[in-house]
Amino acid sequence: MKPPRRKLIIENRSRLFDIDWSALWEYRELLYVLVWRDIKVRYKQTAIGVAWVVLQPLIAMLLFTAIFGYLAKMPSDGVWYPVFVLSALLPWTYFAQAITRAGESVVVNGRLVGKIYFPRLLLPLAMIVTPLVDFVLSMVLLFGLLIYAGIPLTWKVSTLPAFILLAMLTALGLSLFTSAMNVKYRDVGHAIPFVIQIWMFASPIVYPVSLVPEQWRWLYGLNPMAGVIEGFRWALLGRTAPDPVVMAESIVVLFVVLIAGTVYFRKMERQFADIL
Amino acid sequence: MSDIAVRVEALSKQYRIGARGKSSGTLRDDIVSNLKSLFGRNSHGAGSSNAGSAVSVEPAGATNTFWALKDVSFEVKQGEVLGIIGRNGAGKSTLLKMLSRITQPTRGRIEIDGRVAALLEVGTGFHGELTGRENIYLNGTILGMRGTEVTRKFDEIVAFAEVEQFIDTPVKHYSSGMYLRLAFAVAAHLEPEILIVDEVLAVGDAAFQKKCLGKMEGVAKEGRTIFFVSHNMPAVTRLCERVICLDEGKLSRDGTAHDVVKAYLHSELGTMSMREWSDPDKAPGGEVARLRAVRVRAEDGESTEKIDIRRKVGLEMEYEVLKSGYKLRPAVCLYNEEGVRLFDSLEHDPAWRGRLRPPGRYRSTAWIPGNYLAEGTMFVNVGVDTLDPEVEQFYERQAVAFYVIDSCEGDSARGDYAGPFAGVVRPLLNWNTVFNPDGI
């Protein structure tokens, strides 16, 4: 089976927002292969392999519980602190990983970009997908903990994918900026880990949103991860419904970032091979 | 369906000088220049895309752009095998990168009719930690094959690469030969309608190069359109009917392979047996040494391109040492017209070997004895490395060429035999035949 024949025109293209959907579809196998390569390579030559996926959030949870739960007596909306913090840590870890890896995806694959044509969008896209595997595996830990704590699962759990999608799209939107910008300004690569650290404390991970004063909520909601984490806690722990202002804002911000990111990426994409 | 596979129209590519290097374009610089352009006219015309003819009007010194390719137009028919030649920096790679959609043209356009696969490097995307089997799938998909297609051709690929036993070993444990064979094997089994190949054959040992060339010939015979870029003139003439030659970003010649290659080898410097770089800035070289001239000398010292098979021939290079305190190792390397590397030879003049050389001009000549080379065209690569650590100062491929001619006067290795004579060398050996009618 040969793909349908079509005449290809190559010229200096400068439309603002055009994604070649058919090319993305045509190269779907490459997306799969990029994801597969990344997963395969990452745990080769590690002694405990995939156990890292569970170990990292587990240790972070213990640490945060000790410092913020036990020492600082941080309120947690009446939820057992380890569950409270882990339910936020997992989507956050996913997000942080996705941002970090997608941000360097184009630079890391510079050789590929310089030698082969494929829709460049696949690079950040693949790195948004790979940490999902880790995320799903680490969810086992969370569900185990929920059962241990005797917190019943309700229908709300079925809304989790929506919040994961929110996290994915946020990470994608942002990575479209950072990965493209990183090609030209390597400063971005240095800044990302640092920004993530700050961002973590700007997100309701070790503390509940209810701690944020009412009049500042709208500002707080500009952080889409606040919405994602709120959603997670609601779906799993079922105490307080997510703040509608925070949720709505998160979604608006998400779409703005996603669209602007795509435009920026497409604009910069044309120079990738020339700069790398 | 038209029989034109690729139509290139007024294709041009402009680069900003320094834009390719990593040092330029820091965030700070760009912020500063963006601010400048906000508050007034600055010299860097920000919009290169709509600059049009304005580029050439800019005052000298303000322009920091150059055209890697300028107004190149040509058409290639379905099934045609087109060779692209030219010196380093002539725009060959830029052309290929645009044909394969890796980079966009600044102006002009390309129309392509058919599925394209570009092979600008063997083993793109190979990962050392993955096994041979995994890399075949990985690389195949990256080059544009479907998973099912790879599965179908898997055994064929493995057999071609001759790595059956090691197919489940991570490729980092492969020898470099095995690695290259596997990488080429995947690429060789692509089935595009249009194949773009860049210098891939410059790797591997002679036997493997021959295998690759054979495979390429097979592909060409199947009626696919091929773009073949190479410095390997013998390979170009063997594979291509038609050749275009690029010179400083422009299309300088277009014609039959034989004519264009010959003209190319004779171009610029009058004769192909001598090349001189009068402008030191354009001469190939590194920080320590720079090539200034390469000549083929006959026994009598004349620079010539025709060498009598019985006479010795001198391969001479003139170079400049720019810094003191370095040990140099000049070398020559000889290829025949089939692309077989006959030999490498390192300078071993006892006066200089292992000694530090003061700056200045040097002339090193390697003498090949008479009655040693076979008949035909010989291509000479010359290079100089500095030692401890080893750094390549220059390596000029096919710097010069010469013909070895046998005038058949009876005193060469041919004797009075005039038929076809095989072999990559043709030494005149000492023969000794003993006759004893009663048995030895």
Image (spheres, coloured by chain):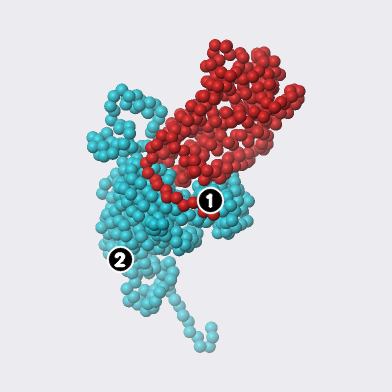
Give the label, 1 or 2, closer to the camera: 1
Q: Is residue B249 above or below residue A147?
A: below
**Side of B131 where B188 appears, left or right:** left
| Chain ID of residue with mark 2 | B
- Identify the disc placed on residue B306: 2
Q: Please tell me whether residue A82 is drawn above or below residue B74 in the rendered image.
A: above
Visible residue check, residue B230: no
For label 1, the residue is B145
Residue B261 at x, y = what percent? 33, 59
On the picture, is B43 further left or further right than A122? left
Q: Classify mark 2: helix, strand or loop.
A: strand
Q: Position of residue B312 (x, y in %)?
A: 34, 65
Left or right, residue A146 beside residue B72: right
Q: Residue at x 52, y 16 (%)?
A: A219
Give the mark nearest the N terminus, 1 or 2: 1
Counting from the top left corner in percent of width and height, residue B65 is at: 31, 38
Residue at image x 63%, y 39%?
A43
Chain letter, colour cyan in render: B
Work out whether residue B390 can be spotted.
yes
Q: Position of residue B369 (x, y in %)?
A: 37, 65
Residue type at tag 2: Lys
Q: Could you tell me the amino acid type at mark 1?
A: Met
Pick the front one: B318 or A22: A22
